[in-house]
Amino acid sequence: MRISMIGFMASGKTTVGKILAEKLEYEFIDLDQYIEEITQMKVQEIFKQKGEKHFRFLEKIFLKKLLRQYEELVIAPGGGIVLDKENINLLKTISIPFLLKANPTIILERIEDISKRPLLDQDNPKETIVKLLNERERYYSQFSNVIETNHKTPEQIVEEILNKLESL
């Protein structure tokens, strides 16, 4: 079984994904970290030097590769993975996707270093979060397994996911 953690940046995908993978004894991969290891460049460097379009290309290539490579996997792609219809189809057909949702205030509180978030590294990051969440809602709404993460511990979220998996 392949499980994907979908959601906006800082919604808990990596933290929850690691715990879930450990409980299931699955492989865990954070797609952004994987891309950084393969390219030997930080995500923000890729955005600056090669542009967002190039990063989205890499994201798609490696998402396909990893979903096909592993049978027992929890994967946490970046928040923008849903901007591509093919990615959404891959996630829905090759994995069981869980959309982790958090409100803009919580998201901003969870981000330790804005400079590592190329889309938010500007004057009013909260305004940008609201704008991006609104733009992405039509993509996020295509996922049916939705987990609200506001004011929950990662362990509570993992239990919720495990309960939903049992009923699928």
Image (tube, rainbow, N blue to C red):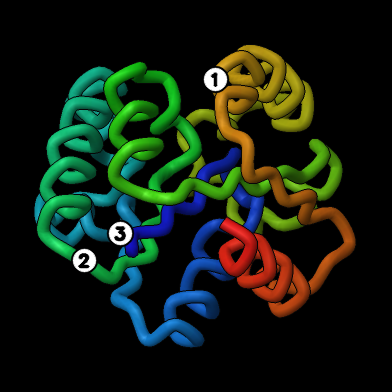
Cα gap from disc 3 to disc 1, whole angstroms: 23 Å
Nearest to N terminus: mark 3 or mark 1: 3
Proximity of marks 1 and 2: CB atoms separated by less than 8 Å:
no
Q: Quadrant of the N terminus?
A: bottom left
Which residue has dot 1 on it?
Answer: 139
Q: Give how far across and how far down residue 144 sits, in percent.
A: 62, 36
For the residue labelled by badge 3, is the local secondary structure a helix, a strand or a loop? helix
**Closer to the observer: label 2 or label 3?**
2
Q: Amino acid at mark 3?
A: Gln
If the image is split into quadrants, where does the C terminus sit?
bottom right
Residue 72's place in the image compared with 75, above or below, is below
Residue 8 horizontal/vertical position (percent): 59, 39
Q: Amino acid at mark 1?
A: Tyr
Q: Nearer the viewer, mark 1 or mark 2?
A: 2
Q: Which residue is mark 2?
A: 71
Could you tell me which residue is drawn at 56 percent across and 69 percent down? 15
- Residue at x 50%, y 42% (from the top left corner): 117
Instruction: Give the side of residue 15 with respect to residue 55, left or right.
Output: right
Which of pointers 1 and 2 lies earlier in the amino acid sequence?
2
Q: Secondary structure at mark 2?
A: loop
- Residue sitting at 57 percent across and 44 percent down? 9
Residue 21: x and y in percent read 43, 77
- Neighbours of disc 1 within 10 Å: few (<14), some (14-19), many (20+): some
Residue flagged by tag 2: what amino acid is it? Glu
User: In this view of the protein, which residue sits in the foreground, 83 or 132?
Assistant: 83
Residue carrying label 3? 33
- Circle nearer the N terminus (2, 3): 3
